Amino acid sequence: MAYLTYKNVGIKGLAAAVPANVIHNYDYAAYFKPEDVKDVVDKIGVKERRFADASTCASDLCFAAAERLISDMAIDRTEIDLLIMVSQTGDFKMPATSVILQDRLGLSKKTMAFDINLACSGFVYSLSVVYALMQQNGLRKALLVDGETRSKIYSPKDRKAAFLFGDGGVAALIERDEKFGNSYFSLNSDGSRESLIKINAGGYRNPSSAETRREKVVDEYGNIRSEEHGYMNGADVFTFLIREIPKDIKELLQFANTRMEAFDYYLFHQANSFMNNHLIKKLNLPFEKVPFSIEKFGNTSSVSIPLTIVSQLNKEFNTPKKLLLSAFGAGLSWATGIVTLDNCHISPLVEI
Amino acid sequence: MEERIKNAFQKALEVEDKEIKLTDQFRDYEEWDSLGQLSLIAILDEDFGVEIESDDFNEIITVGDLLKAVQKRS
């Protein structure tokens, strides 16, 4: 039962970067009939996405976001003592991408840096890790970067994934300040459902081979992918989410001794419009308090919650705002957070 | 309940005029696909308050089987 409480730590600033290359989903029809494309796109609500080019990695998007944040907030780089990167599309298998970024960002060699490998739940999970570490006075400022190039891991010939995912990167500056008050988190995992969203080969369990790279028809709908492409069993994930997510949110509200109505905004992982709309209705939330960025950027995995804040709420944080965060995805792994943003700097969206 | 389940299929698959029979093997419907399945899951949750685990759902073959499964859970 991972319920966590942190005092007087919060996000002071946030920036995001996306590739300039816009994919218009209704026109993304190289492998499918236009009417089928329309059915899928209407249902999942992803009208546009951003795709990184072959030479751009998640870390490049994070780097651009971090540089913009450091410049806009005139952050003293020598005061950043902690750097965490969340990603499942890192630069290399070794070393950790956060360590490479320590040098690229011109941070001190005294910076504590490590990666967190989680999918869509990653930002909320990692925020909790940063908040925990920041209870230590030995750390002055923390930089949490989160980037994904999901466009590179799914098959464009697999209708279940081809229209959904996009790329992006964010950087958040986290500091101690009494104005933030208490934050609360609930963090969860269910590895018995590891096969529901997965890249089956290319790691050490099923090493890369000619066979794992071979594209083949995988179902009765004629979807095509290799064992090294990501896949998703959307129906089973959905069944799981509609049971577990409302429950986790309600339990955390109880733990934090607060009510569902107490929030200025409810930020959900941007999975797809259909699932998100169902969750919002099930929780009886007012739609005007639930920002969406899925239409413009698609599902960017762990990046989606902070990208939604930067792209949809960039003028909203001059007065304290209480946020409920809910993120869920591969693992399965899911997290709920209650945080306050107060005078949070939001940089304009960066395009690279 | 029987009519409501038949309506659930019509709504999920966006085929208001289609005749749905209890003996139909719904995966054979031309309109059945992963999007339709998502819609059906949402309708079962919203209108019937029922969630069916995927392993159990895979055992459900006909519309009548689904009716029984929903009756058992509601």
Image (cartoon, helix red, strand yellow):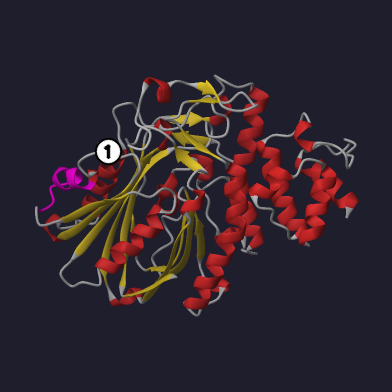
What x and y, as percent, mark residue A284?
65, 64
Q: Is residue B60 above or below residue A173?
A: above
Measuring 34% from the left and 39% from the top, which residue is drawn there?
A89
Measuring 51% from the left and 49% from the top, which residue is drawn there?
A193
What x and y, as percent, mark residue A214?
44, 20
Q: Is residue A320 above or below residue A297?
A: below
Q: Is residue A259 magenta?
A: no
Secondary structure that dominates the magenta span = helix
Which residue sits furthest left? A109
Badge 1 element? helix
Q: Is residue A147 above or below residue A263?
A: above
Residue occupied by mark 1: A60
Can residue A63 be seen here? The reply is: yes
Tell me where the magenta segment starts and ends, as one range: A98-108
User: In which quadrant will I find the N terminus of chain A?
Assistant: bottom left
**Chain for mark 1?**
A
Q: Quadrant of residue A339?
A: bottom left
Q: How many marks?
A: 1
What x and y, as percent, mark residue B40?
73, 46
Q: Could you tell whether B23 is left or right of A75 in the image?
A: right
Q: Quadrant of residue A147?
A: top left
Q: Residues within 10 Å of mark 1 (few under 14, many from 20)?
A: many
Can residue A344 be seen here? The reply is: no
- The three-letter code of the residue at mark 1 reads Asp
Q: Is residue A104 magenta?
A: yes
